[in-house]
Amino acid sequence: MDELIADTSLEDVGESCRPLVEMIGLENVLKLSAYSMGDKIYFPKVERLIAPARNRRIRKEYNGFNIKELAQAYDLTTNQIMNIVKEIDPQQISLFDYDGFDNT
């Protein structure tokens, strides 16, 4: 098998796989092929893969008063930022939960 792999060139690879071979190399494509055994492989979007790192950075930069700025900087909504930081600031409430009126 190793000899056959060594003799395999880009021209031997199907047209649909060539961009992948050019991107990650034939050896890595062969590893993915062996891993999937012919089944389809799901690759999440980059945004999904980097979301945990983005969220850690948002929590680190959060100061209690900069939700709008963080939303703009990370192209998220203020609600998304509030959901991310509520783990570190349980006092952070939704605007819909706010009862700022004195009802006395």
Image: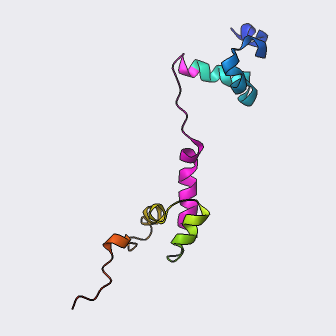
Q: Height in image: 15 above or below 28?
A: above
Quadrant of the rendering where the C terminus is positioned: bottom left
In the image, what residue occupies the spot 37% across and 69% down?
Answer: 94
In the image, what residue occupies the spot 52% across and 30% down?
Answer: 42
Give residue 28's quadrant in the image: top right
Quadrant of the rendering where the N terminus is positioned: top right
Q: Note whether residue 100 is visible.
A: yes
Of residues 54 and 96, the one nearer the viewer is 96
| Rendered location of residue 53, percent (x, y) | 57, 54
Q: Left of 78 or right of it: where is 103?
A: left
Residue 59 within the magenta-colored segment of the rendering: yes
| Rendered location of residue 49, percent (x, y) | 56, 45
Q: Left of 35 or right of it: where is 1?
A: right
* Residue furthest left in the image: 104
Magenta region, main secondary structure: helix
In the image, what residue occupies the spot 51% across and 19% down?
Answer: 39
Q: Note whether residue 9 is visible.
A: no
Colour scheme in the image?
Answer: rainbow
Q: Height in image: 96 above or below 80?
A: below
In the image, what residue occupies the spot 33% across and 70% down?
Answer: 96
Residue 34 within the magenta-colored segment of the rendering: no
| Rendered location of residue 16, percent (x, y) | 66, 20
Give residue 32's quadrant in the image: top right
| Rendered location of residue 48, percent (x, y) | 53, 46
Number of numbered discs on residues: 0
Q: Height in image: 48 above or below 56?
A: above
Q: Which residues are magenta?
A: 35-62
